[in-house]
């Protein structure tokens, strides 16, 4: 075995051990927090209507899987539809703005204004426009995800260096060729940053929108209903379901980002 190959294997093994150590440290910290939570709620006899113990939440989660599954399906339909439409539309408009600087002066300030709108005020309007089923939740998610993608993509498309652009111009590369082979690859870290931000925003938007009208299913609907019944263990079970879903979406996007932007300095420094 050559020295270079042995060094590469050694480096990969070191990186794998480092990742395993990070995961174990996070898991250990989480277990300590849960143990502290369990101890406080049982030691001080905290009423379940104020703060149920983690063991009670886990038991309710396990016993309510059919209900949680139906709620998850209802909410995730709005999340995925709005997430895809919002991000694709934001990226396409960013490319249009990059091609037409006049739009940048008009659309970006408008985008900043719309992104500052409180979602709790927008959600009831969307429910009135698109009805009580998942399309109204998707519309709320589109409003929440469109402008983070737009702003990040515009910045990312302008991140290519002047030297690289001049080199492409000397090769008589068209605008489309420069976009596909230079500017979009350079913009990928910014685009993934927006995708990761929007993965959590979309869940928040869909759940908040369900507070204002939905069929009798959905994570937001269940949370608002069970709070009224003082069934806090079910509320925490729904919160746990939303947290797990958001974490898995974020982790999947981070994995794809690492594979597609392995060349970026932020990843090279970790290996």
Image (cartoon, grey):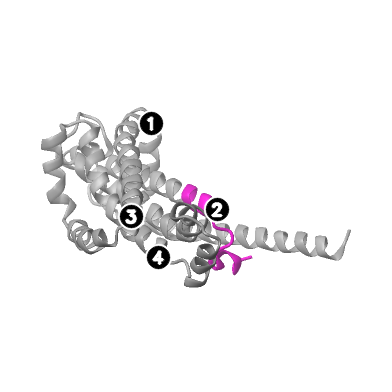
Mark 4 residue crowding within 10 angstroms, few (<14) / some (14–19) / many (20+): some
Q: Does 147 lie within the magenta span?
A: no
Q: CA distance from mark 2 to mark 4?
A: 19 Å
Mark 1 residue crowding within 10 angstroms, few (<14) / some (14–19) / many (20+): few
Q: CA distance from mark 2 to mark 1?
A: 36 Å
Task: Name the N-terminal-most of marks 2 and 4.
Answer: 4
Tag nearer the camera, 3 or 1: 3
Report the front residue among 93 and 8: 93
Residue 65, disc: 1
Tag nearer the camera, 2 or 3: 3
Residue at (41, 62) in percent of width and height: 156
Residue at (40, 43) in percent of width and height: 245
* Secondary structure beneath label 1: helix
User: Residue 22 in the image: x percent, y percent?
Assistant: 57, 61
User: Residue 109 in the image: x percent, y percent?
Assistant: 20, 63
Marks 3/4 in contact by CB < 8 Å: the verdict is no
Mark 2 residue crowding within 10 angstroms, few (<14) / some (14–19) / many (20+): some
Report the front residue among 164 and 123: 164
Task: Name the N-terminal-most of marks 2 and 3.
Answer: 3
Q: CA distance from mark 1 to mark 4?
A: 47 Å
Q: Is residue 214 left or right of residue 15?
A: left
User: Where are the magenta residues, as a range?
Assistant: 251-271
Where residue 40 sits, quadrant-wise, is: bottom left
Residue 94, disc: 3
Residue 158, disc: 4
Report the front residue among 117 and 181: 181
Where residue 212 sits, quadrant-wise, is: top left
């Amino acid at each position: 075995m050559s020295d270079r190959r042995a060094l590469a294997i050694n480096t990969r093994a070191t990186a794998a051990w480092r990742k395993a150590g990070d995961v174990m440290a996070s898991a250990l910290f989480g277990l300590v927090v849960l143990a502290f939570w369990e101890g406080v709620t049982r030691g001080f006899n905290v009423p379940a209507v104020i703060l149920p113990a983690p063991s009670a939440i886990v038991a309710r989660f396990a016993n309510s899987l059919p209900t949680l599954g139906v709620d998850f399906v209802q909410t995730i339909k709005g999340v995925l539809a709005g997430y895809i439409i919002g991000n694709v539309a934001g990226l396409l408009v960013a490319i249009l703005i990059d091609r037409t600087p006049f739009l940048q002066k008009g659309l970006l300030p408008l985008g900043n204004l719309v992104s500052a709108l409180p979602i709790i005020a927008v959600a009831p309007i969307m429910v009135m426009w698109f009805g009580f089923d998942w399309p109204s939740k998707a519309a709320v998610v589109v409003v929440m995800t469109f402008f983070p993608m737009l702003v990040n993509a515009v910045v990312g498309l302008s991140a290519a260096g002047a030297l690289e652009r001049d080199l492409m111009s000397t090769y008589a590369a068209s605008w489309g060729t420069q976009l596909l082979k230079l500017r979009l690859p350079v913009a990928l870290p910014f685009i993934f940053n927006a995708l990761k931000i929007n993965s959590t925003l979309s869940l928040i938007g869909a759940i908040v929108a369900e507070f204002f009208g939905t069929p009798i299913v959905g994570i937001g609907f269940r949370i608002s209903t069970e709070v009224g019944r003082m069934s806090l263990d079910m509320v925490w079970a729904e919160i746990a379901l939303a947290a797990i879903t958001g974490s898995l979406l974020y982790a999947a996007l981070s994995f794809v980002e690492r594979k597609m932007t392995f060349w970026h300095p932020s990843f090279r420094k970790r290996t």
